[in-house]
Image (cartoon, rainbow, N blue to C red):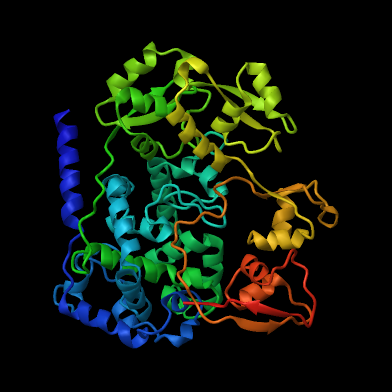
């Protein structure tokens, strides 16, 4: 026990001291040089996402090479700059631009990432070191998700390490109605370490391995073969890889420099404390909100400790959960003396498509209002087969019910009720989807035969289209007039003026997405 406590104390001390490295004068000067590359009045977001690489200076490859703390000689001009890093370092125009972006453009976001990372950093570093990886790679979780265990990309990549479904399953992370272990900070970190290790073994270069983590090893291998070089910067100077991948390594390097010198850049010590925990095996269908009440800890803490649970209840079989550190014996006693229904707080019923809430309520002798409230159901009948949680009167808890409903609303598919004048493609565009994606969600619906009052699924669940990245801020300029041309759609016009279909329809009082050539529309154009 003494050894465990000492490890935790050392880990906490390491977290608070290892991040605040010093930036030497040469580094400061190169950062100031970023002002010559990225003008103050320009739009940072557009620079980082839309411009062609040719508009920035070519990387200084004399700085790049393969410098790390292991092979930089003490008499090297880069020794002082790179000695604190254990991955190769490069100072390029792109890296400098991102340093400026994270420290000057979005400092609040950067600080929030620093705060959140402190919950997991000691554990991530420990796992990476166990797997034989450079500890500086822990910063890659900033690039992936901002250390957000619940981050979901538009493509469906999930968790702190943004694993797609297939890759997650390949590395043993279970995904079903109850759990998504891509969100588990231990399992996902272990998988990320193994994946990064395999990529490095394949490509023999950390920059190529990191780029392959983003783009996929197959695409990276084809780019290497096409350009006949193993130099990431030489490859990224071309347009073979997507801009997201070309910028992936510069983003990481910039975040690593900022992370190691965050005090120098004006950031404060991370506010969040490390998550310390013990692990126990919970019986089937254990309500972690109930267990939080019994332990006298917050629901938020139990959620943070068990992010893999999609619901605040464990699967219908024994499942390992985390409880606050040294509270494991107490938790085991609480679970042992509770009955199955007391642990779950609900009965679980397999609701069928088209079944009414009133019918379900009658089966279990509860009010339909209680069922709707607990399950976040806003309609009279079920639009799809789903699990229904039936509240048990003797264990009713309004606060737990309310928080349970908030989670269930995210699990439930989202539907759009068709209005008069709607078109299938218009509904797709209004929800930022392609028509074929909407068709995949609704295979039994014929796009040409939709009708008012019909429900169309627009997201498979409430997590779809959620991203950890901050929304782009914008300001409005004077309205502009636009004459519709042949082939135009509200979607294409909205993209042209950086606005939304909904905004165009609202300003022009359009009841549907149908427009005709020659019509003049008022557009409220968005600019940064």
> Which image quarter holds the N terminus?
top left
Q: Position of residue 398 (x, y in %)?
A: 46, 28
Q: Is residue 212 left or right of residue 281?
A: right
Between 244 and 291, the residue placed more toward the observer is 291
Indicate the quadrant where residue 273 lies: top left
Q: Say which residue appears at 71% left-offset and 29% top-offset.
A: 356
Q: How many marks?
A: 0
- Residue 4 in the image: x percent, y percent? 19, 33
User: Which residue is rendered at x = 35% and y = 75% of the image?
Assistant: 95
Q: Is residue 232 above or below residue 38?
A: above
Residue 219 visible to an observer of this rendering = yes
Foreground of the two, 133 or 106: 106
Task: Give the left or right position of residue 472, taking residue 106 as reference.
Answer: right
Which residue occupies the foreground of this view, 45 or 245? 45
Q: Is residue 132 left or right of residue 78?
A: right
Q: Position of residue 275 (x, y in %)?
A: 28, 40
Q: Position of residue 87 (x, y in %)?
A: 30, 64
360 in relation to 503, above or below:
above
Residue 63 falls in image quadrant: bottom left
Q: Is residue 174 visible?
A: no
**Residue at (45%, 56%) from the top-left corner?**
468
């Amino acid at each position: 026990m003494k050894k465990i406590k000492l490890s935790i104390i050392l880990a906490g001390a390491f977290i608070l001291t290892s991040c605040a490295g010093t930036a030497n004068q040469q580094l400061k000067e190169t950062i100031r040089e970023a002002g010559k590359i990225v003008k103050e009045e320009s739009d940072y977001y557009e620079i980082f996402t839309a411009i062609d690489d040719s508009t920035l200076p070519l990387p200084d490859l004399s700085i790049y090479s393969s410098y790390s703390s292991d092979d930089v000689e003490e008499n090297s001009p880069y020794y002082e700059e790179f000695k604190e890093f254990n991955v190769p370092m490069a100072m390029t125009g792109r890296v400098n631009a991102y340093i400026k972006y994270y420290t000057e453009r979005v400092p609040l976001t950067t600080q929030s990432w620093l705060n959140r990372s402190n919950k997991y950093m000691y554990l991530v570093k420990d796992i990476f070191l166990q797997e034989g990886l450079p500890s500086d790679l822990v910063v890659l979780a900033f690039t992936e998700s901002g250390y957000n265990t619940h981050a979901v990309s538009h493509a469906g990549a999930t968790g702190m390490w943004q694993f797609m479904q297939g890759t997650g399953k390949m590395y043993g992370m279970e995904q079903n109605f109850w759990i998504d272990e891509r969100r588990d900070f231990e399992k996902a970190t272990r998988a990320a370490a193994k994946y990064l290790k395999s990529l490095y073994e394949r490509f023999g270069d950390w920059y190529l391995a990191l780029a392959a983590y983003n783009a996929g090893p197959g695409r990276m291998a084809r780019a290497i073969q096409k350009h006949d070089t193993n130099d990431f910067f030489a490859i990224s100077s071309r347009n073979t890889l997507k801009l997201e991948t070309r910028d992936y390594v510069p983003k990481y390097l910039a975040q690593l420099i900022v992370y190691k010198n965050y005090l120098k850049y004006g950031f404060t010590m991370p506010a969040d404390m490390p998550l310390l925990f013990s692990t126990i095996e919970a019986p089937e269908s254990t309500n972690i909100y109930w267990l939080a009440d019994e332990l006298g800890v917050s629901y938020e803490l139990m959620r943070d400790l068990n992010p893999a649970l999609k619901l605040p209840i464990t699967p219908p079989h024994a499942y390992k959960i985390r409880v606050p550190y040294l509270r494991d014996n107490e938790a085991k006693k609480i679970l042992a003396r509770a009955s199955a229904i007391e642990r779950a707080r609900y009965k679980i019923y397999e609701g069928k498509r088209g079944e009414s809430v009133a019918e379900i309520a009658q089966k279990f002798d509860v009010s339909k209002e209680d069922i709707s409230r607990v399950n976040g159901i806003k309609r009279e009948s079920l639009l799809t087969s789903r699990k229904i949680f039936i509240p048990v009167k003797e264990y009713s808890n309004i606060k737990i019910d309310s928080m349970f409903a908030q989670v269930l609303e995210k699990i439930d598919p989202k539907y759009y009720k068709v209005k008069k004048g709607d078109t299938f493609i218009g509904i797709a565009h209004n929800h930022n989807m392609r028509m074929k994606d909407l068709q995949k969600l609704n295979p039994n619906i014929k796009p040409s035969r939709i009708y008012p009052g019909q429900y169309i699924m627009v997201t498979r669940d409430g997590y779809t289209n959620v991203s950890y990245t901050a929304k782009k801020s914008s300001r409005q300029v004077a309205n502009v007039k636009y004459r519709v041309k042949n082939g135009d759609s509200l979607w294409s016009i909205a993209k042209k003026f950086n606005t939304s279909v909904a905004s165009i329809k609202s300003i022009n009082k359009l009841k549907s997405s149908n427009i005709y050539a020659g019509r003049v529309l008022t557009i409220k154009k968005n600019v940064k």
